[in-house]
Image: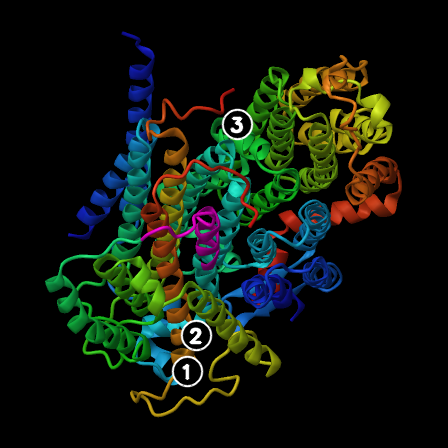
Amino acid sequence: MSIKPYIFRIASLILCVSLGLMLFRGIAALPVTEKVTGPASHYLARTAGETGARNVVGAILFDYRAFDTLGESTVIFTAVCGIAMLFSRRKFHRSSRGLSFIAKRGIGIMVPFLLMYASVIILFGHLSPGGGFQGGTIFATVTVLLCVVFGSSFESQYFPPRTKDILESGGALLFSGIGLIGLAAGTGFLSNIAAGFPAGIFGSFLSAGSVPILNVAVGMKVGAGLSTIFYSMIKMLDAGHDHREGGGIE
Amino acid sequence: MTLVLAIMVPLLSAFLVPLFHLARKTLSVGLIGIMGLASISAALAAAHTGWYSPAVSLLGGWAPDIGIALVGDRLSSAFLLMTAIGSGAALACALEKFGGGPWRFYALFFLMLGSMNGILLTGDLFNLFVFYEIFSVAAYLMVAFSMSWQALEAGLKYLVLGTIGALFILLGTAFTFMATGVLNMALLAEALASIPRETLTAISACLVLGLTIKTGAFPVHFWLPDAHSSAQTAVSALLSGVLIKVSIYALMRVCYIFFLGTNGAVFLAITVIGSFSVLGGHLMALRQDDIKRLLAYSTVAQIGYILIGIGCASAAGAAAAVFHAFNHMLMKMGLFITAGNLSEEKGTREICGLTGLWKSHPLWVSAFAVLSASIVGIPPLNGFMSKWFIILSSAGAGTVIPALVIAAGTVISAAYYLRVLSAFISPDEGSSDDLPPSVPRKPRRRSVSFAIVGSFALLCLVLGVMPFSPIFREYFSSIGQTAVDVEAYVGLVTGR
Amino acid sequence: MILLSYATAVIIFCIGLYTIMIRRNLFKTVLGLALMESAVLLIIVSSGYIPGGVPPIAPFSGPAVNPLPHAFTLTAIVIGASDIALALAFIVKLHRHYRTVDLDRIRGLRG
């Protein structure tokens, strides 16, 4: 019975415990916050006036710090590109026939409501909690449900992979395009009211300038991306074992 | 405006690549070349702006504490120049080898280029994390691109360790935000002076640990040899030459701006890590049989040199570190491209199998000889110059042990590079007699790769002589001074 | 009490890190990553808490909680999910070659 793995385990345990103690001491040394200070107080006080959006978190994500959101949706774009690349050599052999009749009928009734729910969350992201990411994820969930309940060939008939590719690139280009409008107007990349987007009436659907458009762009991108990830992986599992290896060049 | 374009042009190219692929099946080399040229010229324009008129670009028009600011100063422009040259060379090699076929590879390449420029230009800590993640995900995928089992395993190891590093950076960012409430790096430089001592320790530990994991310094370097050796030639050159430098930039920025005035122990830790990397990297390289793994371990050691330079916490040290980073990019990219092409010709990556190359490819072997001489540190070449500057700056900081470590490292690296060169020069073992005479072995024409390697070797010779001219020395020391001058950075961003 | 939330998050972070370090099964490594990520997100969200605060949707009926950590968390969740999805994709591909997910057997690259 070798002692070496036990030494390693004990050493890692000591390392992790000391790391945890150091982190906790760092947190505990901070004073308790009674009220919001710094940039956050600026956001809370001035969002309604400067952006026209009711949802302060949405305004931060799509107006003040919209560049972070562009970066984050690019992370999804990269991951989707990569996963599609990893599973690109599997051709579709067969798909499962799906679940039982009751499941199919039940999901058939629910899907329109799910799609409406997802759309509401995306489109009203500037007025209530929600936004592009949350709604896009629900869209992707709908496609996952269709894959599981009806079989992947049914789902790829209704949402072919080409459409998803176009939606994803389209969402990214829409986001960048709105940013470039701001750059062309001279007020800075990804500027909102200053670049001329109409602020609208506070609290109405058509308000907050470019925030709803950016919500839609991100919703397209995230929904199509997550759906492509699931479809790539399920396509491989459905196709059965295949011993061909090779380079990744398509 | 040029600062934003340096980031957006590559990202837009990456977003357009799938649409072009849907329109026609294979992209033409010319199209990718045009997009590459556009991205590189945008990066060079931003470098020019940063050098002659340091600029701040406030995205969305919001003030720095409310929104995100992009900052271009001399340090950023030096690294922008580095990444422009390096990625241009890698793109040319990849285009020559693959053609326009693998469109996902080029999409990932442009995403990586855009995110590298993003890291180099951002002035906001959370934005740095986001772009670092784009850059890392693209890097994991490019390592795994060839999809052999070694590449997948190396990619997974890189992913796990890289994500741990990213989570530490995120944790450090979270602590910073909890302590001060702002995330702009310039404003943080002022705010960090007044937070409790234990929190500052936690922040510095998390940030430095996360950034050194991503750089590949000694205790947590395990992903580096696998990733750099299992990737394709152009990708290995890009990883070792360019990606590591961007990680070094992030470490330099964060450490100099946040910890120069507040927490001096960070620099001592970096010097120690650097010294261990030098010794560990060289000693492990001595044991390798595979030429690409040997070069990867040599990269670990060279990172150690750069970290020793950063750890001096002075303008001279920063300038020496940047100079060594630039030289290492030239040398290591040339070495990887040469090693990749020569091992493809011979069909093996074992050093003992790479024999008789002096007869068949004399130009390649002589380029390799020049590059390896400069990376070892033979006097009139640039490797010696940058190592000398690092030794001078660490002596100026008052420590003697790093200088001894560097000297020992030079001796060990001479040993293993001589071993590789002697294998190249030794006569062929007669393996080519096994082929039937009806299959002639025609050497593949890799003229673009050779042009790149040859020009890098020439640049090594030129840069070895240039430090004797005072104009050059003045340029490089101004980079070092910009790196450590925190008040100037804060003044640039806040306009005071 | 908010300090309890921070303590829980730090403990979960250390459990995740420990899991990754003594890993044997690749899936447990990915679970360790997910634990670490969740812990960091919990720390970020807890930092925005104001006693008696309301959600940051204008108009406010009282003092609103800090909206900035919520924005960071949304971004970090997406990034973390992409990383973990990529890790799982790698594991599925590796499994097809090695027919196992035990790390001691998947040690082709040594030295």
Q: Which residue is mark 2?
A: A63
Q: Say if B411 sits above or below B19 in the image.
A: above
Give the CA separation, mark 3 to mark 2. 41 Å
**Circle 2 — which element?**
helix
Residue type at mark 3?
A: Phe
All told, the count of numbered labels is 3
Q: What percent of the width, then of the height, locates residue A48?
A: 35, 82
Q: Which residue is mark 3?
A: B218
Q: Say if B157 sits above or below A3 in the image.
A: below
Q: Does residue B470 appear left or right of residue B199 in this picture? A: right
> Residue C46's quadrant in the figure?
bottom left
Q: What percent of the width, then of the height, locates residue A239?
A: 35, 47
At a point 30% along the width and 50% down the height, the residue shown is A30
What is the span of residues highlighted in magenta in the rendered image?
Answer: A77-94
Give the CA separation, mark 1 to mark 3. 49 Å
Image mark for residue A50:
1
Number of residues whose C-alpha sits closer than 10 Å to that of mark 3, classed few (under 14), some (14–19) or many (20 or more): many
Residue type at mark 2?
A: Asp
Q: Nearer the viewer, mark 2 or mark 1?
A: 2
Nearer-N-terminus badge (2/1): 1
The chain that hosts pointer 1 is: A
Which residue is nearer to you in this view: A26 or A90? A90
At a point 63% along the width and 20% down the height, the residue shown is B282
Q: Are marks 2 and 1 in contact (CB under 8 Å)?
A: yes
Q: What percent of the width, then of the height, locates residue B273?
A: 53, 28
Q: Are marks 2 and 1 on the same chain?
A: yes
Residue type at mark 1?
A: Glu
